[in-house]
Image: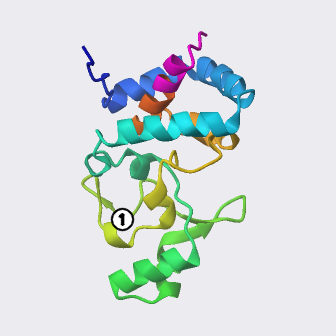
Amino acid sequence: MNREQHIELDLKKIEALGEIREDENYEFRTFLKQKNPERIDEIVHRLNEEVSSRIDCTKCGNCCATLQICVTHHDLERIAGRAGAKVEQIKEDYTETDEFNDLVFKHVPCSFLKEKKCSIYEARPDNCRSFPHLHKPGFTSRLWGVVGNYSVCPIVFNVFERLKKELHWKY
């Protein structure tokens, strides 16, 4: 019998497990760093497809509610076009430069999040479009971000937990 694995969607539970498993996740990060990065990418991409196909991100919005979003000039142009505003006005009203000299939305939760939905969804920044970035190559080179997003994003949480099982990793 091929039963589908449970998908955890409870954000409070995911956040709590993130705190409880923080040390475990950093140990697993170290373990992953020693593995073949291309093989880990193959596994993560497959797991991401399996998990993300069962989760509707537009019903969550937790990333928009808890993370600071990096934006590009191209993102600002798209947002300004949607809003019927000038790029400089969008930049002044909604962005700031962070400590890494990156342009970011200055408010958390995101100013464009309305009732758990993105009010500029069709014009949202590229960083939002590709979140949680698990489909990209180089998973093992981005593990700080993955561990950081574990307690925020149900997709990251479920993929990371399945990856532990698939690699028979024990804490």
Provide residue 4's location: percent of width, then percent of height.
28, 23
Which residue: 46% across, 24% down? 162
Which residue: 63% across, 19% down? 23
Which residue: 56% across, 13% down? 168
Provide residue 144's location: percent of width, then percent of height.
65, 38
In the picture, measured across the screen, residue 84 lies left or right of residue 101, that is: left
Q: Amino acid at mark 1?
A: Phe
Secondary structure at badge 1 equals: loop
Q: Which residues are magenta?
A: 162-171
**Of the pair 91 and 61, the residue shown nearer to us:** 61
Residue hosting label 1? 112
Instruction: Tell me which corner region of the image, top left, top right, bottom left or bottom right, holds residue 113.
Output: bottom left
Provide residue 121's location: percent of width, then percent of height.
33, 66
Instruction: Tell me which corner region of the image, top left, top right, bottom left or bottom right, holds residue 55.
Output: top left
Residue at the far front: name it: 1
Which residue: 59% across, 14% down? 169
Q: Is residue 166 visible?
A: yes
Residue at the far right: name it: 34
Q: Is residue 87 magenta?
A: no
Q: Is residue 163 magenta?
A: yes
Using the image, determine if residue 43 lies above or below residue 27.
below
The colour style of the image is: rainbow
In the picture, measured across the screen, residue 98 lies left or right of residue 62, that is: right
In the picture, measured across the screen, residue 171 lies left or right of residue 113, that is: right
Number of labelled discs? Answer: 1
In the picture, measured across the screen, residue 49 lies left or right of residue 39, that is: left
